[in-house]
Amino acid sequence: MKQFAKRIFKLFLLGVCLGLVMIFLQRYLKMDSDEFLSIFLRIALVVFLCIQFITVAYYLFYLEKMRRLIRLMRGGQIREYTEAMEKLLMAAKGKRLRDILRLNLAAGYAELEQYTMALNILEDLSFSGLSSSSYNQVLGIDLFICYFKTTQYEKAMETYRKYQAVFCKCRGKKPNGSYMALVDIMAAIIDRDYARAESLLDEAMETYKEPDIQEDLLRLSGMVYSNPNRRS
């Protein structure tokens, strides 16, 4: 809401400045009021459309760069991805764009097991919130997993409860369903509900065949089946 208000205020200021310039030109050129108003509205519309076009083009330009960098991470070049994302973030302008880049940078830190750096970003984004539901899904999932892997279980469950409305939208669905399955299993482990954890593990192992997800599921199965509190 604050960003929207700032955007409206900037457009208002631009309109005022443009109006003052046009009034000066009207008096200088001694134009008829009706003719001047018609020209002013056309110029204002052109300026507005140009600003919108430049903003969208700038946003899409950076998103395409970000997508190219994500290929590095998927290819296992995590450090190269993180360093390139840091440089991209330094050059980017605009809160919404920077928030998306920061979210992706945090994912790189988490892959490098630099959880403190990842959490610094994720906690800040969680406090301010993201505009897109899909990005909030990623934020909630990444935040929970980072808390789990740093054994901050109380904060993990607080996050799990806070993002339930968002999590419900991605369970069993692409692109975040597999990661949501991991989160649900981790939450069951924290709650020491090992029967539920086993059931979720079996279902996830059958459903999600991606190598990285299978690897994470195997780690979690080790936590479940080796736990002395688990009932045989």
Image (cartoon, rainbow, N blue to C red):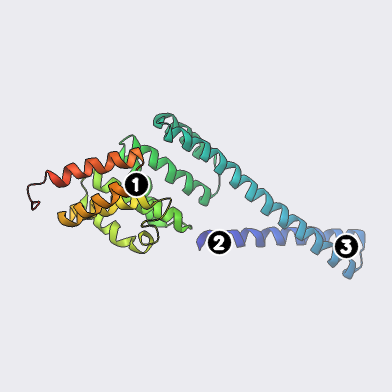
Mark 1 is surrounded, within 10 Å at the Cα level, by few (under 14), some (14 to 19) or many (20 or more) other residues, namely some
Q: Earlier in the sequence, mark 3 or mark 2?
A: 2
Type of amino acid under label 1: Tyr
Q: Which residue lies furthest to the front in this view?
A: 206
Mark 2 is surrounded, within 10 Å at the Cα level, by few (under 14), some (14 to 19) or many (20 or more) other residues, namely few
Of circles 2 and 1, the one toward us is 1
Q: How many labels does the image show?
A: 3
Type of amino acid under label 3: Arg
Mark 3 is surrounded, within 10 Å at the Cα level, by few (under 14), some (14 to 19) or many (20 or more) other residues, namely few
- Give above or below for 11 relative to 186: below
Of circles 3 and 1, the one toward us is 1
Residue drawn at 37 percent across, 52 percent down: 177
Residue 101 in view: yes
- To which residue does mark 1 refer? 208
Q: Where is residue 172 in the image (x, y as percent from the top left)?
A: 37, 56
Lateral position of residue 164 relative to residue 34, left or right? left
User: Is label 1 in a helix, a strand or a loop?
Assistant: loop
Q: Earlier in the sequence, mark 3 or mark 1?
A: 3
Q: Which of 21 and 156 is in front in this view?
A: 156
User: For the residues marked 2 and 1, what is the alpha-carbon distance in whole angstroms?
Assistant: 39 Å
Looking at the rendering, which quadrant does residue 83 occupy? top left
Type of amino acid under label 2: Phe
Residue 53, numbered circle:
none
User: For the residues marked 3 and 2, what is the alpha-carbon distance in whole angstroms?
Assistant: 35 Å
Looking at the rendering, which quadrant does residue 41 occupy? bottom right
- To which residue does mark 2 refer? 4
User: Is label 3 in a helix, a strand or a loop?
Assistant: helix
Q: Which of 197 and 83 is in front in this view?
A: 197
Residue 27, numbered circle:
3
